[in-house]
Image: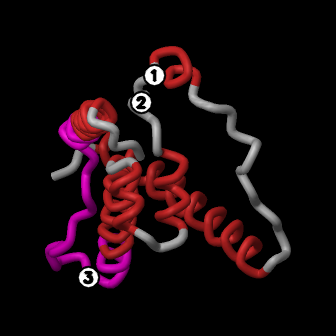
Amino acid sequence: MKSLRERSVNKTLYILGLIFALLLITFLSLVHSGRLHFDLTGIIPPCLFHQVSGLYCPGCGGTRAVHALLEGDLIASFLYHPFVPYAAILYALFMLSHTVEWITTQKKSSHETRFTKGLSLKSSYLYAGILLILFQWMVKNLLAIFGIHF
């Protein structure tokens, strides 16, 4: 059974997730309809960490990964920065599971048991994300030593 605090946090995150989804859908609709021109070329400064050290930073590839994900290219997104699709999948699972929980809760009578339970965020998801970031950072820099660049 979820604690009252955990339910409150999940409800807040769910509402924020719905707002994010609505803003993202609106933004993508405007871009794809031609009503909004969005080009990051020249806007994002070069990576200072990369310029100074010659190494990739832990976030290198993140912007390209988001762009590839928004274009529907999950494989390219993963190759640019695997944390981006990881976070997107966690977001989708969280939102879907809480939507199903909300729908089934609305339809159940008072004596029925709930069969669905929304995904609870755990610190292990955060630690897995951090490990994923560190792993991809090490792999990209090792490959760069052998002349393979992303």
Tag 2: Cα neighbours inside 10 Å, few (<14), some, or many (≥20)?
A: many
Residue at the right extreme? Answer: 35
Q: Amino acid at mark 3?
A: Ser
In the structure shown, which secondary structural element does the residue marked by tag 1 occupy? loop
Mark 1, Cα crowd under 10 Å, few <14 / some 14-19 / many 20+, is few
Q: Residue at x 38, y 48 (%)?
A: 81
Q: Earlier in the sequence, mark 3 or mark 2?
A: 2
Amino acid type, callout 1: Gly
Q: Is residue 109 left or right of residue 67?
A: left
Q: Is residue 87 magenta?
A: no
Query: Considering only vertical position in the picture, is 8 above or below 77?
Result: above
Q: Is residue 104 left or right of residue 9?
A: left
The magenta stretch spans which residues?
101-130
Q: Position of residue 16 (x, y in %)?
A: 53, 53
* Residue 103 point in image, percent of width and height: 36, 79
Q: Residues within 10 Å of mark 3 (few under 14, many from 20)?
A: few
Asked whether 78 or 93 is in front, the reply is 78
- Name the disc covering residue 109, or none: 3
- The amino acid pointed to by label 2 is Tyr
| Residue at 44%, 35% in the rendered image | 59
Q: Please state the horizontal and vertical placement of residue 63, each as a whole percent of the image.
A: 54, 48
Q: Is residue 120 magenta?
A: yes
Q: Quadrant of residue 139?
A: top left
Could you tell me how far apart the alpha carbons at marks 3 and 2 are, in whole angstroms? 55 Å
Q: Residue at x 18, y 39 (%)?
A: 124
Residue 56, label in figure:
2
Tell which tag, 3 or 2, sits nearer the viewer: 2
Q: Which residue, given by chain and number where applicable, does mark 1 sit on?
A: 54
Vertical order, 31 against 87 (above or below):
below
Secondary structure state at the residue bearing disc 2:
loop
Gap between marks 3 and 1, in whole Å? 62 Å
- State the residue lying farthest toward the top: 52
